[in-house]
Amino acid sequence: MSLTADDVKKIAHLARLGIEEQDVVSYAKDLSGMLDLMARMSDLDTGGVEPMAHPMDQAQRLRADAVTEQDNREKFQAIAPQVEAGLYLVPKVIE
Amino acid sequence: MHNKTIAELAKGLRSGEFSSVELTTAFLGRIKQHSSLNAYITVTEDLALQEAEAADARLAKGKAELLTGIPIAQKDIFCTEGVKTTCGSKILDNFIAPYNATVVDKFNSAGAVMLGKLNMDEFAMGSSNETSYYGAVKNPWDINTVPGGSSGGSAAAVAARLAVCATGTDTGGSIRQPAALCGITGLKPTYGRVSRYGMIAYASSLDQGGPMTRSAEDAAIMLQTMAGFDEKDSTSVDLPVPDYMAGLSNSLEGLKIGLPKEFFGEGLNSDVAAALEAAINEYRKLGAQVTEISMPTLKLAIPAYYVIAPAECSANLSRFDGVRFGYRCENPVDLTDLYTRSRGEGFGKEVKRRILMGTYALSAGYYDAYYIKAQKIRRLISEDFKKALSEVDVIMGPVTPSTAFGIGEKIGNPIEMYLSDIYTIAINLAGVPAMSVPAGFAKGMPVGLQIIGNYFAEGRLLNIAYQYQQVTDWHQQAPKGFE
């Protein structure tokens, strides 16, 4: 299976991932190569096999609904690109 | 000093032969002397000397543990509070971690001294350390070749004696493959054995941290500190940690070794195959019985992995968006531009390739054909391992198809690079533990023997590696110029 330059642009948009215009063709080629590799999966009949998401088929552990974290806002915001009055700043979303 | 094992160094520190400050200073000197290997991203000289002083005080009080005062280094994927933690990426070039990974906390409580943070493939995606934003690491055995990846800085640093030992992480071979290419000992524990808290995620159902050392004994000491249940990691396994040192000398008489025929076929370099054969003969002499086995689903591990790992990566890496931490592009015009450009400018090409692949595999209309299909194959692979490990005690085979390849040789062809992970990837899909042990040389370059065990059989693997290291000296050899 092969992907076109347009497919790559669509996927990049879904991932909100900027890619250089001059690289689009090479991504299309690499991803198509990966898809060819993956096509080998169809060699194996997996009818009736339960998908495995976790090596130990473990269920997620639950914890008591209790406060365990301290307030680390200042510490965490100290490494943020832009903050004001305890809020993370981004470009204006609503006009 | 730099050639001694952890146990020998611990003894020297206690007898007063040298102090931790002296030991740490010696290693810091070596790191500077060999900075051209590019093994470290950050050297934490001041912090290391402070920690060494504290370790000396603790030793003087008689309250030391085996690792107290021992200079180690952390792969730059582990968060270290107050210290730059980059994961090999431009997007985290300005990231000072606000907390410690559990693994880092554990080494701190043991009194180990951190020399610095080690170079790695960007977000642990790579098999050569060439995808790092901080440049390629050189293999100390031949500086024109790669050290392997993604824990390439860890392997190069340990092989070149720029740290006594180091941490690594392994998602598809990232501890074992560089350990093999640099001639050191590396262990990927059972999934869930070592906490992933504070270890920057690549593919959460596959990632596992582990020790990278010069010997199996050192690996046992390191794993003893690293392993154990952690409430902060929801997939951490709540099982007691055995005494890994206690079982090292157990006899290998009657050990059943299985050799999957799929591991020894076409594609395996003949010099590597010869070294492995000699290693397996050593095991025969130690009393092991060797049988051929078959694991037919192994050949589907690469395609299944390159669906599952990118899918998980595309979800995990969505947190790097330029809003709360890390790199932000200049003058974003709107929110979409902020996300798109911060990520586009912050991530390197291999990371982008995997995000795109994962996004595609998870997108509407393709999810069943790729992601669910890969998870079904994952189950069949894991069943193959369970079946094999019910018939034999351990599985042995190569770690890599060849010895270290040249810098620049494969980076232009990602698919070829992926195929070099053929012997390591299935182990992560199954979640079982596996080691790479130095097993000789092919044309002067190190060869690794892979030993794969059952779930939570790390102690047995260490025992099997340790016994081999009692009758061979491959693991004691140092690259020329680094003795």
Image (spheres, coloured by chain):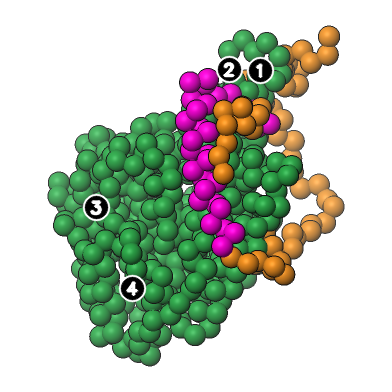
Chain colours: A orange, B green
Q: Residue at x 49, y 43 (%)?
A: A33
Tell me the distance, in whole angstroms, between the alpha carbons under discs 3 and 2: 44 Å
Question: Viewer-nearest of labels 3 and 4?
Answer: 4
Residue identified by numbered label 1: B337
Q: Give amino acid for label 4.
A: Tyr
Which of B368/B60 is in front?
B368
Q: Are marks 2 and 1 in contact (CB under 8 Å)?
A: yes
Q: Residues within 10 Å of mark 3 (few under 14, many from 20)?
A: some
Which of B189/B217 is in front?
B189
Q: Is residue B257 left or right of residue B448?
A: right
Question: Viewer-nearest of labels 2 and 4?
Answer: 2
Q: Quadrant of residue B383?
A: bottom right
What is the chain letter for disc 4?
B
Residue at the bottom extreme of this rendering: B254
Question: Viewer-nearest of labels 2 and 1?
Answer: 1
Q: Please tell me the numbered disc located at residue B329.
A: 2
Viewport quadrant of the N terminus of chain B: bottom left
Residue identified by numbered label 3: B2
Residue identified by numbered label 4: B466
Q: Please tell me the numbered disc located at residue A20.
A: none
Q: Residue at x 22, y 40 (%)?
A: B144
